[in-house]
């Protein structure tokens, strides 16, 4: 796709900004800001400075007051940053006005996550889903630019200059492309539905690994299935759903590795990845994999449960699997404690698989 409005320069030096309001605990805001920098690292974006700012009232046109904008401009110049990434969502108007005030690229957490997904999607299905989310995110920004241009140019009613014509062509292209992608994803769902019905007839138990990003799902998947799915100590290392069969005492099971969840995941991405996440929807059992060494483990489990409820998995039986116990484990509320890296606790989990039945 060639649309100059949604292309951006490569980021060389980024400033990450967290926003703390009275409706949010400061500790949560700090944690989200740290996570934002980890997301930037996953996207190969160098972060030169992170700043947590408190705002009492969000300004519709710029998010921040004029004084705070000036303070951040000093920081941008001090660190020679060419990009500012906000942890909070920005409207198209806020994004454009902040870029004009600072003369740097400005984008938010949602756009950063979309960038990561675009970099790491490998299968055709995942690439379609990423493109859909990307187009739906950028469409209102393109329309805003078109409306703004229309107001500024003036001229006789009903006339359009070359710039307006190009924006209108881009808008139509994006809308048509969105419709086309959605049709393709419908076909993907039909294929998945056929595969699911075959599994149901075969009586094979289907287990899905779900959980917060970087909890170690892919490493656990590899350990259980003896597969070689890509696993890395980064957020969103896995985007493509992978399914393998394993045989335990002459009993076959199907295990699926899924994309990780995250706090404040853009709603458009949840919708766009519904076809992939439907593997979890049609599972007989969910294993919620959590990082036992993470101090925010409980919050991450809560995030996972919220996303599962949103995609229709609330009624599926689930078990909590605390992973990475070789690093640290201060948690007692779990069904299984394992280390996918060392193999500790894996036999107990496999014994459980041997004895469970499909209801």
Image (spheres, helix red, strand yellow):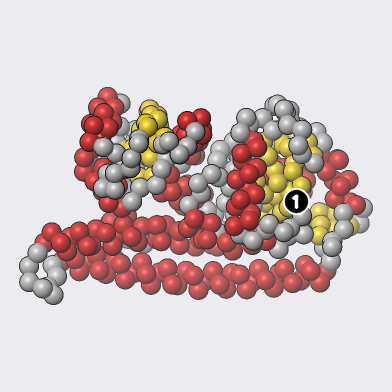
Asked if 240 appears above or below 303 in the picture, the reply is below
- Which residue appears farthest toward the right when viewing the image? 249
Q: Which residue is mark 1?
A: 318
Instruction: State the residue in front, 66 or 227.
Output: 66
Q: Percent from the top left, x then y, of residue 345?
A: 82, 36
Q: Percent from the top left, x then y, of residue 88?
A: 41, 43
Residue 14 seen: no
Total number of numbered discs in the rendering: 1
Within 10 Å of disc 1 (Cα), the crowding (few <14, some 14-19, many 20+) is many
Q: To which quarter of the image does residue 320 belong?
A: top right
Residue under the image location 72 percent in, 28 percent down: 329
Q: Is residue 43 left or right of residue 188?
A: left
Q: Quadrant of the N terminus?
A: bottom left
Instruction: State the residue in front, 176 or 145.
Output: 145
Residue under the image location 26 percent in, 37 percent down: 65
- Which residue appears farthest toward the top when viewing the image? 78
Q: Percent from the top left, x then y, of residue 75?
A: 29, 27
Residue under the image location 27 percent in, 59 percent down: 144
Residue 113 seen: yes
Q: Percent from the top left, x then y, of residue 275?
A: 59, 63
Q: Is residue 175 left or right of residue 327?
A: left
Q: Is residue 250 left or right of residue 31?
A: right
Per the image, label 1 sits on a secondary structure element best described as strand
Q: To which quarter of the image does residue 201 belong?
A: bottom right
Q: To which quarter of the image does residue 327 belong?
A: top right
Residue under the image location 24 percent in, 46 percent down: 97
Q: Quadrant of the C terminus?
A: bottom right
Q: Is residue 166 left or right of residue 353?
A: left
């Amino acid at each position: 796709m060639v649309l100059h409005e949604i292309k951006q320069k490569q980021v060389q030096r980024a400033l990450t900004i967290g926003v703390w309001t009275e409706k949010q605990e400061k500790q949560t805001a700090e944690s989200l800001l740290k996570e934002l920098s980890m997301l930037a690292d996953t996207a190969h974006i160098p972060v030169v400075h992170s700043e947590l700012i408190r705002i009492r009232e969000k300004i519709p046109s710029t998010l921040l007051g004029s004084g705070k904008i000036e303070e951040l401009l000093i920081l941008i110049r001090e660190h020679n940053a060419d990009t500012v990434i906000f942890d909070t969502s920005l409207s198209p108007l806020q994004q454009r006005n902040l870029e004009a005030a600072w003369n740097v690229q400005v984008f938010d957490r949602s756009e950063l996550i979309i960038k990561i997904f675009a970099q790491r999607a490998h299968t055709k299905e995942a690439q379609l889903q990423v493109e859909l989310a990307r187009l739906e995110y950028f469409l209102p920004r393109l329309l805003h630019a078109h409306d703004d241009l229309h107001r500024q140019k003036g001229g006789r009613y009903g006339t359009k200059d070359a710039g307006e014509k190009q924006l209108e062509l881009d808008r139509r292209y994006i809308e048509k492309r969105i419709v086309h992608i959605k049709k393709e994803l419908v076909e993907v769902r039909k294929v998945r539905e056929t595969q699911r019905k075959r599994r149901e007839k075969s009586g094979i138990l289907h287990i899905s690994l779900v959980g917060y990003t970087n909890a170690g799902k892919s490493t656990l998947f590899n350990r259980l299935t003896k597969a070689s799915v890509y696993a890395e100590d980064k957020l969103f290392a896995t985007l493509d759903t992978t399914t393998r069969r394993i045989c335990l005492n002459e009993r076959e099971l199907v295990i699926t590795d899924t994309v990780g969840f995250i706090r404040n995941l853009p709603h458009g991405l949840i919708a766009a990845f519904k076809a992939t996440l439907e593997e979890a929807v049609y599972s007989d059992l969910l294993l919620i994999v959590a990082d036992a060494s993470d101090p925010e483990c409980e919050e991450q489990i809560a995030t996972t449960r919220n996303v599962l409820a949103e995609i229709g998995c609330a009624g599926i039986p689930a078990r909590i699997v605390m992973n990475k116990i070789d690093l640290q484990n201060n948690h007692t509320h779990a069904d299984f404690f394992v280390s996918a890296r060392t193999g500790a606790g894996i036999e107990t989990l496999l014994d459980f698989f041997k004895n469970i039945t499909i209801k």
